[in-house]
Amino acid sequence: MITSGVTCRPLFLTEFIAIALEQHLNKIGDREKYLDYIANRPRVEKFNSHGLFTAGDEPLILNQVADEISAYTGNVWTPIISLRREDAARLGYDNALAWKALLSSKAMELAENLKIHPDHLKWYAAFHNESHHPHVHMVCYSPDPREGYLTRQGIRKMKSSLGNEIFRQELIPLYAEKSQRRDDLKEQAVQSMRELIRQMKSGILVSDRMEQLITYLAERLQNTSGKKQYGYLKADLKNMVDEIVDELGKDSRIAEAYRLWWETRGRIESIYTEIPLDSPPLSRCEDFKTIRNMVIQEALQVSSGTMTFEEPASVETALPEDTTADDIPSLDVTSEDEIAEPVYDFEEQPSRRASAGKSKSYHSWWTDEYKLAKKYLHGDEDAEIPQDLEQALSLFLAEAENGNPLALYDIGRMSAVGLGCEADSEKAHQWYAKALAKFHVAEEERPWKYTEYRIGKMYAAGLGTEQDYLQAADWFTLSADENYKYAQYSLGGLYYHGKGVEQDHGQALRLYTQAANQSFPYASFELGKMLQDGIGCEKNQEYSNRRFEEAFRGFTDLEQKSRDDKLQYRLGWMLLNGVGTEKDIPAAKKYFEKAATVGNPFACYQIAKLILSEQNANSEDVEKALGYLRQAVDAQNPYAAYFLGKLYEKGRHIPQNTAEAVRLFRLSAELENEYAAYRLGKLYLGGEGALKDVEEALRWLNFAADKKNQFAEYALGTLYFKGEDVTRDIPKALEYLKRSAAQGNQFAQHRLGKIYLMGEDAPKDVTAALQYLNASTDQGNQYAQYTLGKLYLMGKDVQKDKETAIRWFTLSAAQGNVYAQFFLDHMDSFKDPSVLLAGTRLLHHMSRIFADNAPPQGPSIPQIDRKRRLKLSEKKRAAGHARGDHEQSMSL
């Protein structure tokens, strides 16, 4: 039996190439005559006595081939490939040899698409050099009658393979143009669709007809047995569901979105076919059929009297913004490197705890050359010495040759951040190591609280050595025992954070107090924080304020003596935040700029934020701010890396680059920034800018949660509650949500309130629900306010109280909650708000369907009647087509 195609309208390459059969071929009765016809008909190009050819150079004996095919009992396919005369001449396909080479090269693909083993494929062809349409007849089959069948996908692949090869050079620009057209169409549609989806997500739907239909469907479903799904309903109920869907489609937002969606689909398909398709009613569009079962679910909720609390989709699906993290108080995690180096005091002489050993004058470290280098490093307005980093570096190098550890340390710092030289972390480490070695030599010669402190500082910060808090604590203790205020402060920090020693806030408070009583402003500042927060002591705001003021005066005095960038940063921070002094942003900015010029990473971060927050910042200012941020990132400042990552993530002041945001968040998280870890978890969870990686998301969210980050705890609770990306685990979800709620997270409090109200995933507990909801409303959460308003209006779990409901609705509506405003506007105009708001929930369902359902990228397959499809399928299987293949012919 010969399976053949029929003439059809080609798709993208209509004017170039077609596969068809001539109309009179159905009159040819058997295969032998067909082979004789294609091999000997007029205008066939012959090889010796006939025109039949196949791969290889062996001549074919026509009678043998005819006998072979005539005796064959399996399926035989006979495609015809035709070109226009001008195309065949231009492309070189106006002779049999060219076609022989083409078909020989494509034999493997033909076999694959005919589902024939490559070693089994038998094919023959003949070239007919017709005047208007030169073409090739083919005969294809397998010696094994059980092998070979043709699918719709196989036909499509053969068309594509032959067309791409014949028109290789001409297709490249055509496909590029087609792709660009499709992308342009998509982009045009996306912008409009996003706005419509936003309106659907945030809006409400008011329709008397919808209310009537849902009420009636709810009543009918109560008396319906069996599965409550669209496919199992009786015809009249299906019609009712369809009517609700079509009523939904009358909403102007959905109607416009559907029109736009179908128009985009049609314009994309017009690239492939010229046959336009009319849009069916919304209820009949296969791409939106999921809304039918959502209609049924809403009706079931109405019939069961289930309490619902409408919220925008973002509340349920998105993790909350960590808004507080935009202004992380970096002084909460101070590092040893943030403390200004002590100014030499000639009254502070080396200790005589050990034998004097070799006599050594430590005054030689603070030479005039070293002091001058420090002035060039920072600039000295009083001495009229401008900042000159290269001159400072030159003087430090001269001092370093004399073995001055202070100069060696300063060169290390300049090398680390690129001051007066190229930034080079390896060289910086070498300079720091030399400084540390010199401090050790000096300490061995003659113990001194100053060198002990400097050694401890380098171990604490990991400068010139591995970071080692245990060693740092030992060295600081030696110095602190000599009542050295710098060491007392630093040791207090280790006790406060539990680094190198067991955490002990009482011991930290004692050490800070000892240092502060020696007029040490850093310690006064830390005492102010502890008194303000009640850490290691009772809260005392008045005493806290006095300590902060004491710190500000002390920092000011120290800065006037040493012009140190760390002091300038401290002063800028206190002026910026109004701590210990009146808030003065211009003055803060000046201090930050001074500190930033010598690479202070904290100051670089703060001045960049100030510049970018200014409304009149020009492009030059923005570039300057970004330069400061990058400089701080290079210095391993976790807050700068986090902030710059957010700029890349949001595309603010800089082109959006989520991959770069991921890199920066990872860097910040690895530097122990819990906010960056949370952000990184969000990105990996959403697959934004990186492949979705739930394992990585959980890793970073757990990292942040272990540091008691309330947003990460809430995110993990939500993940385990929903069970979409992880196995659903309600006990674990409740644990994380309660941890987050205990830290005052209003989202977690609201969600817990709903969980205990609904009683589906945890035992119903109205008392606990009200406690959580009220805690959330205390923070102004509009969704919790709305929930309480509806609760008191419905009066199902609490005593009905219309006035209380109105009060909560009013508070929620004032924050833009459209549902709360809806209730205020319709307080006396409906009987059952759940029925009317079911339509609103369907509106939101549609927004998600539109958001997830982009118009198809290629031509759609026309739908035909089921019975006719079965009959066609039977005929085609008998003709050698595979089950489910609906295509009638091949065309390129």
Image (cartoon, helix red, strand yellow):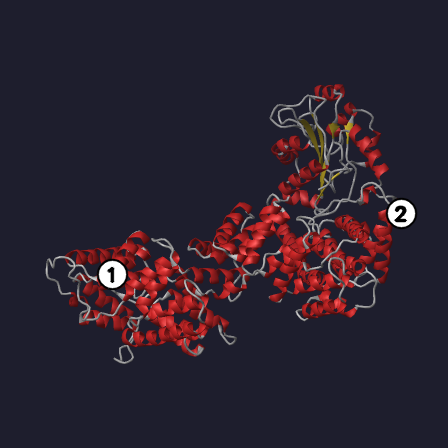
State whether residue 527 appears in this view. Answer: yes
Q: Earlier in the sequence, mark 1 or mark 2?
A: 2
| Residue 153 image label | none
Residue beneath the point at 55% across and 46% down: 694
Is 82 located above or below residue 521 in the figure? Answer: above
Q: Position of residue 472 (x, y in %)?
A: 29, 55
Q: In this rendering, would 38 be left or right of 668?
A: right
Q: Quadrant of residue 752?
A: bottom right
Residue identified by numbered label 1: 479
Q: Quadrant of residue 143?
A: top right
Q: Give how far apart the Cα atoms at labels 1 and 2 are.
A: 89 Å
Q: Position of residue 793 (x, y in %)?
A: 76, 64
| Residue 236 image label | 2
Q: Position of residue 677 (x, y in %)?
A: 49, 54
Q: Residue furthest left?
A: 358
Q: In this rendering, would 451 be left or right of 875?
A: left
Q: Amino acid at mark 2?
A: Asp
Q: Residue furthest front?
A: 538
| Label 1 with label 2: CB-CB less than 8 Å | no
